[in-house]
Image: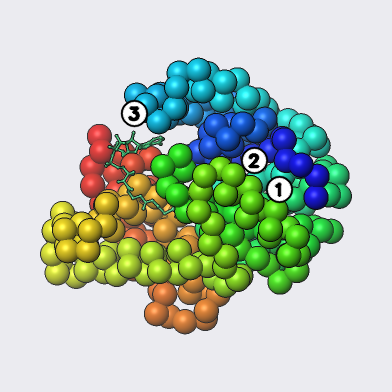
Amino acid sequence: MSELTNVSVIGAGTMGSGIAHVFALGGYDVNLVDSSKDSLEKALSSIKNNLGKQVKKETITAEESDNSLARIRFETNIGSVDNSQLVIEAVYEKKEVKEKILKELDSLCPRETVLATNTSSISISELALVTNRSDKVIGMHFFNPVPVMQLVEIIKGRSTSGETFLFIKSVVERLGKIPVEVNDSPGFISNRLLMPMINEAVFALMENVSSAEDIDQVMKLGMKHPMGPLALADFIGLDVCLNIMEVLQEGFNNDKYSPCPLLQKKVAAGELGRKTGVGFYDYS
Ligand code: 3HC
């Protein structure tokens, strides 16, 4: 496999900009692609701000921050991916949306380019079917905030080659992150464990077992989680949590993963957590 120098990231939302940030800091040239100019502008300001936090903490120097920012190209044209050896899609978590992008990437990229997806729960084997390179399609699941969280789940689809897996594993390690190897299964490991916990916390709130603050306090102080499950749901986005519960329910064909009606109600009302200013807590 050719040496990695240039990485494209598709989707300049929270995850895409976090992924662009860590690759640029790792010394790679990054091509961050989004069809929306507005999203690219927001990504630039969030990456600047997050690099600034690291400078303030003295984990990186101001020069490293400037050099990293200079390594990122902000692009609206997806055709710009053709000189990347690795392309990571981090677009909206809907199977049809990801399939459309992967199909397009497959037609634009040279045969040897690895196509990774930052999907949080959708089957890698199924996503790979829309391409003509299923041996080079792999899951690369980062965690929010990407510059802070150490873990990357690497998910092998049915046809992902050993060579592709070892390539991605070494890339993750070179970024200073810790990889775990996971076989393709709904929600992988992270969201198969995390989302039912969040969903159960929402049931406890709906059934008035305790207040949101106290439910969160139990997991923070009793289990030493950095955030309680309801605050974490607001941080992740309630629409994302609901999507993942639906993937688990459908993928395992088991109603133990039924999304809590309160979670469905909040998403229908547009109360998606921090990004809309209200979720289980009010951020306005
Ligand atoms: N970029 C760079 N640095 C950042 C940052 C960012 N985006 N956000 C926070 N930081 C740094 C801060 O500078 C700070 O550094 P310091 O402690 O050395 O000064 C440190 O991270 C902690 O930040 P804060 O002091 O601002 O705030 P907290 O101490 O409250 O920590 C948190 C914030 C890191 C988000 C912490 O609450 C946490 O770890 N929460 C859990 C997050 C989590 O579970 N993420 C996974 C979500 S699931 C997911 O992403 C998968 C998907 O599929 C759903």
* Residue at the spot 63% in from the left edge and 47% down from the top edge: 171
Q: Is residue 187 left or right of residue 171?
A: left
Crowding near pointer 2: few (<14 within 10 Å), some, many (20+)? many
Q: Nearer the viewer, residue 279 or 51?
A: 51
Position of residue 145 relative to residue 243, above or below, is: above
Tell me, for residue 57, which label it has, or none.
3
Sequence-earlier tag: 2 or 1:
2
Judge: label 3 CB < 8 Å from ligand 1.
yes
Q: Nearer the viewer, residue 90 or 25?
A: 25
Tell me, for residue 10, which label it has, or none.
2
On the question of residue 42 being in view, the answer is: no
Position of residue 175 relative to residue 254, above or below, is: above
Q: Amino acid at mark 2?
A: Ile
Find disc 1 in the rendering and name its residue. Answer: 101
Judge: label 2 CB < 8 Å from ligand 1.
no
* Residue at the spot 57% in from the left edge and 20% down from the top edge: 67
Say if mark 2 contacts mark 1, CB within 8 Å: yes
Q: Measuring from the top left, give residue 134's x and y in whole percent.
A: 78, 62
| Cα distance between the residues tagged 3 and 1 | 37 Å
**Which of label 2 and label 1 is nearer to you?**
2
Crowding near pointer 3: few (<14 within 10 Å), some, many (20+)? few
| Cα distance between the residues tagged 2 and 3 | 29 Å
